[in-house]
Image (spheres, helix red, strand yellow):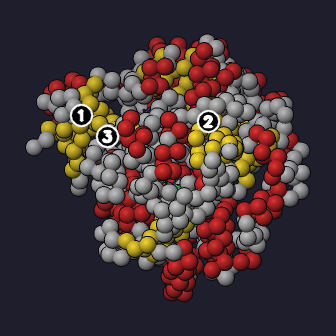
Amino acid sequence: MKREVFSVCGMCSARCPIKVEIVNGQITWIEGNPYVFGIEKSLCARGSAGLVHLYDSERPRYPMIRTGERGSGNWKKLTWDEALSYVVNKLSEIIGRYGVKSVAFLDRGAGLFGEMQRVFIKAIGSPNYFNHDDLCRKNVDLAVQSLIGIPRGDISYDFTNAKHIVSFGRAFFDAVVVREANNVLRALEKGAKLTYFDPRVNVTATKATKYFRIRPGTDYAVVLALIHQVLKEELFDQEFVEKYFLGLSELENFIKPYSPKWAEVESGVPADEIVKLSRELGKAKPQVIIYPYWFGARYRDSFYCARAIWILNFLLGNLEQKGGLILAKSPKEVRAQPLKSLLEPIPSPQDKRIEAELNKGFLYDDAGHLLYLWKAIKTGNPYPIKALFVYRYDPFAGMPLESIKSIINHLELLVHIPVDFGTTSWFADIILPESTYLERDDIIGLQRGARPAFIVRKKAIEPLYETKPRWWIFTELCRKMGLEKYVPYETIEEIWYYQLEGTGVDIKDFDKKGLVFLWDEPLLYERNNLKFKTPSGKIELTSSLMQEREVPEFIPYQTPKRPEIEKGEFRLLFGRAAMHTHARTQNNPLLNEIKPENELWINSEIAESLGIKDREIIEVSSEDYTGTIRAKVTPFIHPEAVFMIRGYQNDIPWLSRIYGKGLNEGRLLKGVFDKFALGSHTGALFETFVRVRKKS
Ligand SMILES: Nc1nc2c(c(=O)[nH]1)N[C@H]1C(S)=C(S)[C@@H](COP(=O)(O)OP(=O)(O)OC[C@H]3O[C@@H](n4cnc5c(=O)[nH]c(N)nc54)[C@H](O)[C@@H]3O)O[C@H]1N2
Ligand SMILES: Nc1nc2c(c(=O)[nH]1)N[C@H]1C(S)=C(S)[C@@H](COP(=O)(O)OP(=O)(O)OC[C@H]3O[C@@H](n4cnc5c(=O)[nH]c(N)nc54)[C@H](O)[C@@H]3O)O[C@H]1N2
Ligand code: SF4
Ligand SMILES: [Mo]
């Protein structure tokens, strides 16, 4: 018998809507949801390999408790009841001794279905909910919040109608999100230009209309020079800027020294090209998109660079414009009833979250500053953190072993809730494996954008092994903690009914297309009548909120440190490749076949001077760690940088297909988790230098 189920891919955080075909209880086919614009049946390699992940013997299949030292690799199988009882007993002990704020929850991210896990931490009463964003997009997020009062997720990009797309290392065709990749390609087919800046030639660079090999860490210089030129030649949208900008004269004063000629010296991007680009953008406006990063936890000035990129967009008046940036519409704005919140009925915690207690951090959003969490665990300041739950995230996969050890030494309970084995599970006390996305139902989520929709993930098959869905794990944990009043539901259906109450939408409505659109067409606001969610209602280049928090609105450019190349010192860059998701798919049998091992990209001239040959095994060292990796000698990378694909956890024995192969960039990041980006207090992962030499 053949069935079809609409669901949502879970092989990366893009969460593409999918359609799954099941024949006699076996999944036979997965494709992109045909009804969703930009997806239309397509799927990336990882999305297809989800099927292989499902049957992979090297994923956790039942709850496990550690029996030896942390990291010894000795484990015992538990039943779910035993595992959850153990967690709850231990947790009660810790709360009794240190108070409930000593419990922290580290989530990959709230995302579409994220309310469920937050129910648990809110129900127990701890303020310490964190997500990974400080090491990902937080700079971009805080930057746009500081200007127009909404997070990045509330802005979408109308690529298909754009005339010119500019990207500073947002690698559309390497760090793939199906919808974006398809829509950017569509724009290119329609004649749009793509200008791409990156210290190395990746796939995205090869598809660009124009590519610049920018010196690592100097994007801010080029963006400042573009703003300089746009203001100087009055290439901006005068009416829009006059109407909505607060602080234009402060910007004009600040930007004066940052000419294209100056930027050329910093970045290596020719001044006349910067002038040309600013004119092209002035001409193509408002159908232009300057993509404000995604992975923005790069350099010390990345928050200010992201702010500058947003400012450049707004100068060109591309908000609420075809081919520009589109603001998300809430269900209320399209006259629909929002989903009922699972979190709202739970009282807010009494205590302050770590960085609020320290009075540090940007404090705009509610997801915490991760680097302060690590610090608090290590130092006990401002108060001890003794229990840590890590959900859908493998933070230790990208960290040096010393940092991991210094964290776990202070924890009395570390619970990992993954779908794969990884470094965090290796060092955890207990592993609670979730069912994969193909085997589980999730709560209903709101897909934001110009055309908001409700979307749900539905299981295609029953779990193959003894794994459980998140709604069950967290409601069961609440129940065992005596907090059943906050989870008054027994089944996922009851949760769906609760969420949909009053919306007029029925759960059966999802069977037709997988999602339920709340409006027929993408909706644009009246552009002459915009009101921003800032104190002044304007686009705040100068901001009372930033001033209150003593965060400067503009910071002068500082030349990044130059590595001593002649001594084999380089800036370490890393990033994604289309066939792998972060640190979790390298061991996937199918994806491993495509890219079993990573290499270190190194500039050919420099390699020659160091006597390094293509494909030979070389040594890479940070202050406290040396690893080996194959060299990829290439002219297509800036001489100051070396690059590797991230995520090869080659030192974790239970990942047999990658054990001993390639190198994990995370192990080389000594000291990086103590480096804070200016203004935003987020991470700055590319502020790392390594030594490279021939193998001794
Ligand atoms: N296949 C795949 N796709 C993904 C993901 C995945 O794991 N796998 N993850 C998703 C997630 S969570 C994220 S955050 C995004 C990340 O999306 P991106 O930010 O687009 O991807 P990255 O690979 O982190 O970085 C892209 C490029 O930045 C370049 N770069 C380094 N330094 C500089 C610099 O100073 N200036 C400029 N202009 N470029 C520089 C690197 O050489 C690299 O090619 O990808 C998403 N998409
Ligand atoms: N060293 C280093 N650190 C980095 C980065 C880097 O490039 N290098 N990149 C940063 C960025 S941009 C990001 S987004 C993060 C990404 O870092 P991670 O979120 O750790 O990336 P993944 O490898 O996707 O790991 C996801 C973890 O979640 C689990 N997981 C996946 N799907 C599910 C699910 O449906 N349910 C449950 N319960 N678990 C699931 C996997 O089993 C795995 O343990 O890392 C950041 N930190
Ligand atoms: S981009 Fe690929 S892996 Fe990510 S959700 Fe979409 S299909 Fe799945
Ligand atoms: Mo990310």
**Which is more toward the observer, 596 or 25?**
25
Neighbour tally class for label 1: few under 14, some 14-19, many 20 plus, Cα within 10 Å? many
Query: What residue appears at the point 76 percent right and 36 percent down from the top-left corner?
Result: 450
Task: Judge from the rendering whether residue 227 lies leftward or rightward of residue 75; answer left or right.
Answer: right
> Residue 500 is drawn in which quadrant?
bottom right
Q: The residue under label 1 is which amino acid type? A: Ala
Give the structural element (helix, strand or loop) at label 3. loop
**Which is more toward the observer, 84 or 91?**
84
- Nearer-N-terminus badge (2/3): 2
Rounded to the nearest angstrom, the CA distance separating label 3 from label 1 is 11 Å
- Location of residue 77 with respect to 576 vertically, above or below: below
Quarter the N terminus occupies: top right
Q: The residue under label 2 is which amino acid type? A: Glu
> Residue 634 is drawn in which quadrant?
top left
Rounded to the nearest angstrom, the CA distance separating label 2 from label 3 is 27 Å
- Nearer-N-terminus badge (1/2): 2
Give the structural element (helix, strand or loop) at label 1. strand
**Which is more toward the observer, 183 or 573?**
183
- Location of residue 637 with respect to 441 vertically, above or below: above
**Which is more toward the observer, 182 or 357?**
182
Query: What residue appears at the point 53 percent right and 84 percent down from the top-left corner?
Result: 89
Q: The residue under label 3 is which amino acid type? A: Glu
Rounded to the nearest angstrom, the CA distance separating label 1 from label 2 is 36 Å
x and y percentages locating residue 548 in the rendered image: 63, 55
Task: Judge from the rendering whether residue 41 lies leftward or rightward of residue 222; answer left or right.
Answer: right
x and y percentages locating residue 442 in the rendered image: 67, 56
Residue that carries the numbered disc 3 in the rendered image: 597
Quarter the C terminus occupies: top left
Residue that carries the numbered disc 2 in the rendered image: 31
x and y percentages locating residue 455 in the rendered image: 73, 47
Q: Are marks 3 and 1 in contact (CB under 8 Å)?
A: no
Query: What residue appears at the point 31 percent right and 74 percent down from the top-left corner?
Result: 69
